[in-house]
Image: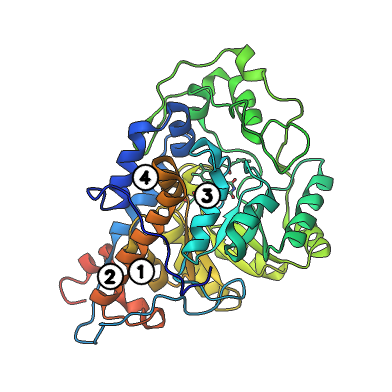
Amino acid sequence: MNGTSTPPAITIPREILSLRDLEAKCLETMAPMVRDYLYDGAEEGHTIRENLEVWNRWLVVPRMMRDTSAVDLTPRTNQFNRSWSLPLGIAPSAMQQLAHPSGEKATAAAARSMNIPFGLSTFSNYTIEEVKDSGGDSVVGLQMYLLQGRRDLNLELVKRAEAAGYKAIVLTVDSPVPGNRPGLIKSNFVMPKHMRFRNFSEDFGGPLDQAQDTQFNDPSSVTAVEAGSAIASEPTRTQDQATKSRGNQLIVDPSINWERDMKWLRENTSLEIWVKGILHPLDAEEAIAHGASGIMVSNHGGRQLDTCVSALDALPAIVEQVSGRVPVHLDGGIRRGGDIFKALALGADFVWIGRPVWWGLEVAGEEGVRWVIQTLKREFEVVMKLMGCRKVGEIEREMVIPKTALMSMGSSY
Ligand SMILES: Cc1cc2nc3c(=O)[nH]c(=O)nc-3n(C[C@H](O)[C@H](O)[C@H](O)COP(=O)(O)O)c2cc1C
Ligand SMILES: CCCCCCC(=O)C(=O)O
């Protein structure tokens, strides 16, 4: 479906007005173990909270009387060689069948109906090909972790993505090892038996099983964690439960490095290579030097390294360093249309969402995901009009100021 088609009508209850309302609805039914995985954050959850709070530390300064009766929300420039209905995409997240039986297929179909891009996680419950069939041209990226001792599997995934018509490999670089996630241990998280990592023909256990096993062996690492609104409350599992995993483990390669691994990817694919998980300007420079087509500024939704900087705070220095050579995208904590505006004003070309998609999936499957996208679109449109911007290209850096600057300048910014 292209951007001019009308998406199907949405029947989410009228009293649900914002993504926050949808989240509350989702939490009424979501199984505790799924909730714990979704909200999971590294250690004490400081970065998860930071990802949500950072948006309110930037204030907007609107312009008036600019005739915003009609607003064009399409991104400033094409991304993945095509035009999208708004500068928003769906970030890769693993195991979406946890939220709905149609999992990634439902999410991709919703992205297609709204003409926004979708990134598929390596650790999905539907295959590269099934998801492409469901999401069509919206399915642009296959996210990959490089697997320890199994480059054969990585190569197979790359070739399947090429054959299926994906545009990009999205290499996640912020996860040489799983973060410390004590919440997962406390909730005894294991992917349910009826679900599989269907991109692999063998019945593998996932990298998080491995993480839990490692953490389990160190009792001092088991601490209470509060992540967002979810508080892990289940009893700690036994050693027996922790080591009961499926056959072989898929383990992410902790020796991942720029020189060897970007070269390997470059030599093995004609697809664009995007690097996901950049927070330092010099890493953006490394990515470009090693052939990246684009950069995703991200802290993995606060799931990897606790107290690490938010993507929004990291963004301006990275944009300056990159200086237009490749597109710069951002994810982490986007929950309102105004958040999209602020990220673009600070220099992002495009933004992505993770957890809100699960709220939509849990409440109403594909329809729920579409509702999430439509709600963000509607909010973004109103914010654009109130800010005096008729198109994305009119969003200016000066339209956002940090609260701290306002305080130090008195009232005359
Ligand atoms: C449940 C869940 C699973 C995720 N799985 C992956 C993954 O497989 N690969 C990856 O690169 N990022 C993964 N992420 C991180 C997202 O791509 C994204 O960076 C993050 O969710 C953005 O933050 P937000 O959830 O606040 O929107 C996952 C995030 C969540 C919440
Ligand atoms: C090495 C980290 C593997 C995590 C797999 C899924 C994911 O990215 C997440 O849960 O976050």
| Tag 4 and tag 1, C-beta contact below 8 Å | no
Of helix, strand and loop, which one carries label 3? helix
Classify 237 as above or below 404: above
Q: Earlier in the sequence, mark 4 or mark 2?
A: 4
Q: Which of marks 1 and 3 is nearer the N terminus?
A: 3
Q: Mark 4 points at which residue?
A: 49
Where in the figure is residue 66, as x and y percent of width and height?
24, 87
Image quarter for ligand 2: top right
Amino acid under label 1? Phe
Where in the figure is residue 182, as x and y percent of width and height?
50, 28
Residue 54 figure quarter: bottom left
Amino acid under label 3? Ala
Q: Mark 2 points at which residue?
A: 383
Where in the figure is residue 147, as x and y percent of width and height?
75, 43
Q: Identify the mark at residue 341; answer none if there is no mark.
A: 1
Q: Residue at x 77, y 61 (%)?
A: 163
Q: Does mark 3 have its CB less than 8 Å from ligand 1?
A: no
